[in-house]
């Protein structure tokens, strides 16, 4: 019996000894660098995009940093490129790639760091869009077609509105008579000086009753450009150097938004940033293509063709009689000037923006 107890004790001791030797194994022997996949770039525009990574294996170690590396000139590695760190605890993560340059090729690569080293995803290349991108265009209910351009994600028509019907198909009347025009309380349109040739070139002039009609002047999915739209467009163009002096304090956009034809001198000396300064062929770097369409005042009189253009923006005074507009004057450089308000019966051009 005594021999049996000694044998049993010996076996238990051996078992414990074997178990202890396993516990002494260094865990780091099973650790490796992390395995990570780079996500394709999405939502690419002229200045930003989205990418990210997916960590499929942490390497049996804590991930201390992860993100995406970006470079214009080489395959990114930590130390030779810009890193955009993601601080979430997620293995599937996204990062915003910002402050990019238009029409520029970039290399991106996801990375993950643990105590063993740096794991890299595959290198992916993408190219940002141009600063100004042509849109898909839009067609109104009368089948008039309008080319469009995209500014910072907002699609604008580059041609004044020509439609003769509201969105639901109701006719917008043409009113030529000066006295009748001056007394309107409902929507109407006209050609400048009632000449259809001017309509072909410049588009129609609408009173604000037509612009504000609940039946809708713009095509489905679009709206008449409002003050906020013009404000946002102005800031975008200034921020990207389309203003004459490249100075954010001076809103001198006239030359960059004016068309390259049809503007002519009104006998006033133009300033250096106006549509009439220098060569007309140097105008319109923004692609907005503002034509000098003139306007019709509240008395029914036509004014300023070839010398100025005005667009309704909406917004009203306390009396709700005067409506805001922006304009461009041929000899003055500051485009989209919020110069004040006009009576709703005045006639002005209209631009449209996609909702």
Image (cartoon, rainbow, N blue to C red):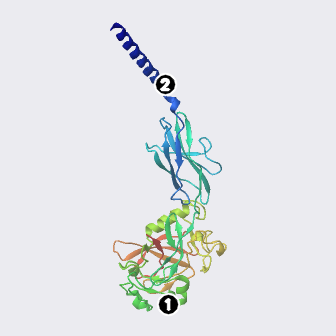
Quadrant in the picture for the N terminus: top left
Quadrant of residue 260 within the rendered picture: bottom right
Q: Seen in the image, is 67 located left or right of residue 208?
A: right
Residue in front for this viewpoint, 156 or 254: 156
Q: Residue at x 66, y 74 (%)?
A: 281
Q: Residue 105 at x, y = what percent?
A: 62, 56
* Neighbours of disc 1 within 10 Å: few (<14), some (14-19), many (20+): some
Query: Who comes first in sequence, dot 1 or dot 2?
Result: 2
Whether residue 38 is visible, yes or no, is: yes
Indicate left or right for 38 with 16 as reference. Answer: right
**Image x and y of residue 226, in percent:** 43, 71
Which secondary structure, mark 2? loop
Q: Residues within 10 Å of mark 2 (few under 14, many from 20)?
A: few
- Counting from the top left corner in percent of width and height, residue 148 is at 53, 73
Whether residue 304 can be seen here: no
Secondary element under disc 1, as helix, strand or loop, is helix
Q: Is 308 or 199 nearer to us in this picture?
A: 199
Distance, label 1 to label 2, CA atoms, is 95 Å
Residue 346 location, quadrant? bottom left
Q: Residue at x 48, y 64 (%)?
A: 232
- Along the horizontal axis of the image, is 286 left or right of 153? right
Establish if 232 lies above or below 118.
below
Would you name the residue on which mark 2 appears?
Answer: 25
Q: Which label number is shown at residue 194?
A: 1
- Residue name at image x 51 percent, y 59 percent: 43
Q: Residue furthest bottom?
A: 177
């Amino acid at each position: 019996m005594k021999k049996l107890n000694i044998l049993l004790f010996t076996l238990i001791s051996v078992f414990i000894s074997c178990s202890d030797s396993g516990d002494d194994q260094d865990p780091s022997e099973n650790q490796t660098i992390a395995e990570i996949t780079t996500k394709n770039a999405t939502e690419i525009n002229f200045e930003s995009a989205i990418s990210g990574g997916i960590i499929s294996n942490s390497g049996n170690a804590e991930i201390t940093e992860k993100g995406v590396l970006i470079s214009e000139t080489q395959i990114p590695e930590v130390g030779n490129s810009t890193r955009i760190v993601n601080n979430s605890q997620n293995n599937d993560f996204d990062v915003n790639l910002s402050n990019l340059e238009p029409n520029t090729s970039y290399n991106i690569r996801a990375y993950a760091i643990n105590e063993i080293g740096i794991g890299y995803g595959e290198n992916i290349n993408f190219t940002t869009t141009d600063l100004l991108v042509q849109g898909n265009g839009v067609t109104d209910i009368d089948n008039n077609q309008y080319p469009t351009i995209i500014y910072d994600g907002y699609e604008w028509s580059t041609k004044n509105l020509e439609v003769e019907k509201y969105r639901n198909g109701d006719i917008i009347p043409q009113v030529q008579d000066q006295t009748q025009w001056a007394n309107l309380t409902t929507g109407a349109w006209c050609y400048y000086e009632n000449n259809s040739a001017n309509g072909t070139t410049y588009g129609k002039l609408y009173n604000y009753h037509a612009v504000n009609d609940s039946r809708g002047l713009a095509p489905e999915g679009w709206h008449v450009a409002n003050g906020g739209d013009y404000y946002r467009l102005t800031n975008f163009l200034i921020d990207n150097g389309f203003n004459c002096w490249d100075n954010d304090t001076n809103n001198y956009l006239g030359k960059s938004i004016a068309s390259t034809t049809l503007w002519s001198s009104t006998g006033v000396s133009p300033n250096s940033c106006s549509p009439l300064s220098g060569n007309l062929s140097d105008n319109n770097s923004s692609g907005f293509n503002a034509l000098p369409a003139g306007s019709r005042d509240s008395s029914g009189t036509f004014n300023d063709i070839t010398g100025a253009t005005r667009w309704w923006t909406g917004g009203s005074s306390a009396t709700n009689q005067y409506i805001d507009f922006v304009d461009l004057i041929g000899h003055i450089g500051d485009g989209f000037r919020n110069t004040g308000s006009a009576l709703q019966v005045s006639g002005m051009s209209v631009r449209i923006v996609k909702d």
